[in-house]
Amino acid sequence: MHLIPGVAAALVALTLLAAPVAHALQPATGKVILTLTGKVGDANKAKSAEFDLAMLEKLPQRSFTTMTPWDKNPIKFTGPLLRDVLAAAKAEGTTLKAMALNDYQTSIPFADIKKFDVVLAHKMNGESIPVKTKGPLFIVYPYDTSKTLQSSVYYERSAWQLKSLSIE
């Protein structure tokens, strides 16, 4: 008689282990504006992680104002830290390959994302960024925080009209 309760407990434990695990990253319900591929640990669509604007806005937001080589005046950029976006999809690697809507491509070392507060901006000066003016997403380094960041190396890593990141 003592064997039966033990077997029942084992069956319950096996059933719980075999139950499907819910993904932490929920599927996008709005228009997808960013797709992560490659070394993504928490995919919400086949082998990729897709984000709509609402998903990005739910992440902690960061703002900073900085000069850029593309404008005469300082601009306030707002969005989640790129490291938080990658963490939401459990993405880990050594390099990010960024692809823009206009087919511009750039490589960003993963070390940059850890070392600098790189923002995935969806707002400039408090307004959503339209596609015609670098939107909907713009990878921006906090250029004014360091002379090191005020160079073509980092300006070239700042992809606007971002549509996807491949994590390698």
Image (cartoon, grey):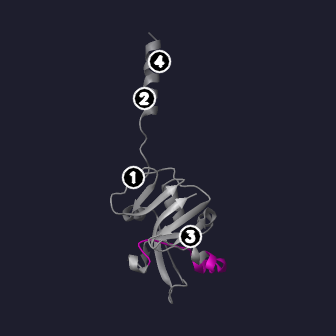
Q: Amino acid at mark 1?
A: Gln
Say which residue label 1 marks.
26
Residues at marks 4 and 3, CA–CA distance in whole angstroms: 58 Å
Residues at marks 1 and 2, CA–CA distance in whole angstroms: 24 Å
Q: In the figure, is residue 150 to the left or right of 6?
A: right
Disc on the earlier residue, 1 or 3:
1
Residues at marks 2 and 3, CA–CA distance in whole angstroms: 46 Å
Q: Residue at x 39, y 76 (%)?
A: 131
Tell me if residue 110 is in the magenta stretch.
no
Task: Judge depth for marks 4 and 2 and give the one in front.
Answer: 2
Quadrant into which the N terminus falls: top left
Say which residue label 2 marks.
15
Q: Residues within 10 Å of mark 3 (few under 14, many from 20)?
A: some
* In this view, 58 is above or below 134: above
In percent of width and height, residue 51 lies at: 41, 60
Q: Residue at x 33, y 57 (%)?
A: 29
Q: Residue furthest left?
A: 30
Q: Are marks 1 and 2 in contact (CB under 8 Å)?
A: no
Q: In the figure, is residue 14 to the left or right of 148?
A: left
Say which residue label 3 marks.
106
Disc on the earlier residue, 2 or 3:
2
Q: Which residues are magenta?
A: 134-153
Determine which quarter of the picture holds residue 147: bottom right
Q: Amino acid at mark 2?
A: Thr
Please tell me the numbered disc located at residue 60.
Answer: none
Tell me if residue 136 is in the magenta stretch.
yes
Q: Amino acid at mark 4?
A: Gly
